[in-house]
Amino acid sequence: MITIFAPDGIEEVVAGSDLAAIILEAIAADPLGPLLDGDIVVVTSKIISKAEGRVEEASRRAELISSETKRTLCPAR
């Protein structure tokens, strides 16, 4: 059986936030928590970027996506 849930109680994440501690605390407080062996936690890149202080102007979005995207081209067969 797969159970998917998003725990409540995660406040605004800012640069320097201890993301692991924040997530573990929220999951432990959730009725579906705590984490058990074999559980999988999925975190968005946005919340990681905010915790790392990687906040940029929206006008640079396309430039930043391009600079952080890897492309692999396979030769035509």
Image: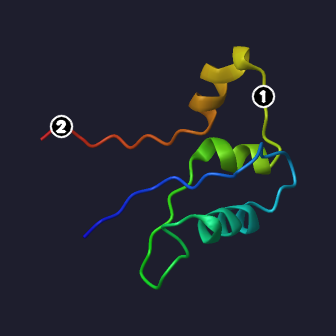
> Which residue: 45% across, 56% down?
5
67 shown above or below 12: above
- Helix, strand or loop at label 2? It is loop
- Quadrant containing the N terminus is bottom left
Horizontal side of residue 27 vs 22, given as left or right: left
Residue 48, horizontal then vertical, whole percent: 68, 50
Give the colouring mode of the picture.
Answer: rainbow
Which label belongs to residue 42?
none
Residue at 53% over, 38% down: 69
What residue is shown at x 78% (from left), y 21% (from top)? 57
Instruction: Identify the mark at residue 76; answer none if there is no mark.
Output: 2
The answer to which quarter of the image holds residue 2 is: bottom left
Q: Nearer the viewer, mark 2 or mark 1?
A: 1
The percent coordinates of residue 6 (x first, y second) are 51, 52
Q: Which mark is residue 56?
A: 1
* Residue farthest to the bottom, as pictured: 37
Residue 54: image quadrant is: top right
Q: CA distance from mark 2 to mark 1?
A: 37 Å
Q: Secondary structure at mark 1?
A: loop
Q: Going by the image, does 44 lie left or right of 39?
A: right
Q: Amino acid at mark 2?
A: Ala
Q: Amino acid at mark 1?
A: Glu
In the displayed image of the protein, which residue is found farthest to the left?
77
Residue 70 in the image: above or below residue 3? above
